[in-house]
Each structure stands twice: as C-alpha cells, then as structure tokens.
Image (cartoon, helix red, strand yellow):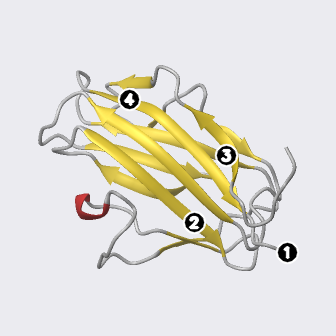
Amino acid sequence: MAYIPGVGRVFYNWAVGGVTLTGAIAETSFGAPFPRTIKAGTFGPNTAIEIWTNTIVSVSNANNKFFRIKIGGVTVFEQNMTSMLQLHRVTKGWNRGALNSQVWTPGSGTSFASGVGTTTLALNTTSIDFSVDQTLDLTAEIATASETMTINAIEVKFYNPPS
C-alpha cells in the first residue's frame, strides 16, 4: 500500500477470539500475538501513534486487575480495572520532533479511561528511542488466581505529518 502523508496507516490490527490470562499474579505478557516489534524509524520524529484496545475482566470486584500497554519496556498506559468489567481505550502518543521524545495522553484512573476529555492528570512523557527496534506489549497483573483478563481487540496506527 502506498504511503499517503497525513493519513493514518494501520501497523497492526487484531480481533480474533481474544487472548485470555488467568491468575497472572505477577505482571505477565498476554503472549502470542504479543509482543509485536515496531521497526526502527516506523515512528518518525513528528509521527503520532494511536493504540485502540478492548479489554474485559471476568469479575467486577475490589481486587486489583492492572492492564498495561508497554513500548520498549516503558509503560505508556496503565489502568487498574477494579470495579470494571470492560475497558475500551484509545492511547495516543506523539514524537516531539525527535525519535526519543514522546508525550502521551494521560493515563490512569477510572475518570479518564476513555483517553478523551478533560482531566487533572499530568501528561505522560517518555524518552523511548525509536531509532532502534522497540517492542509493543500488552500485560496484565491480576490479584487472584481465579480471575481472568481478556484482550478482545487491538489496532495500532501511525500518523505521519503531511510533507
């Protein structure tokens, strides 16, 4: 597919059957098809990345159930899904004129789970080096062995500025 400046291009789109973790008391990757490699230079100096996820848990209760999006081992989004059953999240990040300086939508707390709207949360800044390959991973940490968390869908897009 030809690259069109200013138009999002899908890097990864997956929504087949879901991947479930049960009793991941320590932080654990969801496993195949994760993690995914973001090749060096894919996320250019003025590029935006958009990550849509749909996550569900088996039970809504007071137990901690953390869902995380990580790039290069750095957490770019974390949500404690206590007292939730489903999280549909849009996480967006921008390189700020360099391959190693990013700003992300603020990210945790049930009041800002959608990724859009107003918040008192601070911006999430990172210095992930996109001049080298990086991994995109989805992880979970669940309080009890009987509970589960499932990723139903993920879509990752890159938006390059018009030339």
Residue at image position (57%, 57%) is: 50
Circles 3 and 2: CB atoms closer than 8 Å: no
Q: Nearer the viewer, mark 2 or mark 1?
A: 1
Residue at the disc numbered 4: 150
- Mark 2 secondary-structure assignment: strand
Q: Nearer the viewer, mark 3 or mark 2?
A: 2
Residue at image position (39%, 63%) is: 107
Which circle's residue, 4 or 2, is located before the other in the chain? 2
Residue at the disc numbered 1: 163
Which circle's residue, 4 or 1, is located before the other in the chain? 4
Marks 4/1: CA distance?
Answer: 40 Å
Residue at the disc numbered 2: 93
Mark 3 crowdedness (10 Å alpha carbons): few <14, some 14-19, many ≥20: some
Which circle's residue, 2 or 1, is located before the other in the chain? 2
Mark 4 crowdedness (10 Å alpha carbons): few <14, some 14-19, many ≥20: many
Circles 4 and 2: CB atoms closer than 8 Å: no
Residue at the disc numbered 3: 135
Query: Picture coordinates of residue 78 (x, y %)?
Result: 39, 54
User: In the image, which disc is placed on residue 153?
Assistant: none
Marks 1/3: CA distance?
Answer: 27 Å
The kind of residue on which mark 3 rests is Thr
Circles 1 and 3: CB atoms closer than 8 Å: no
- Mark 3 secondary-structure assignment: strand
Query: Picture coordinates of residue 70 (x, y %)?
Result: 54, 50
On the rendered image, what quadrant is the C terminus found in?
bottom right
The kind of residue on which mark 4 rests is Thr
Marks 3/2: CA distance?
Answer: 15 Å
Query: Picture coordinates of residue 53 (x, y %)?
Result: 46, 44
Q: Nearer the viewer, mark 3 or mark 4?
A: 4
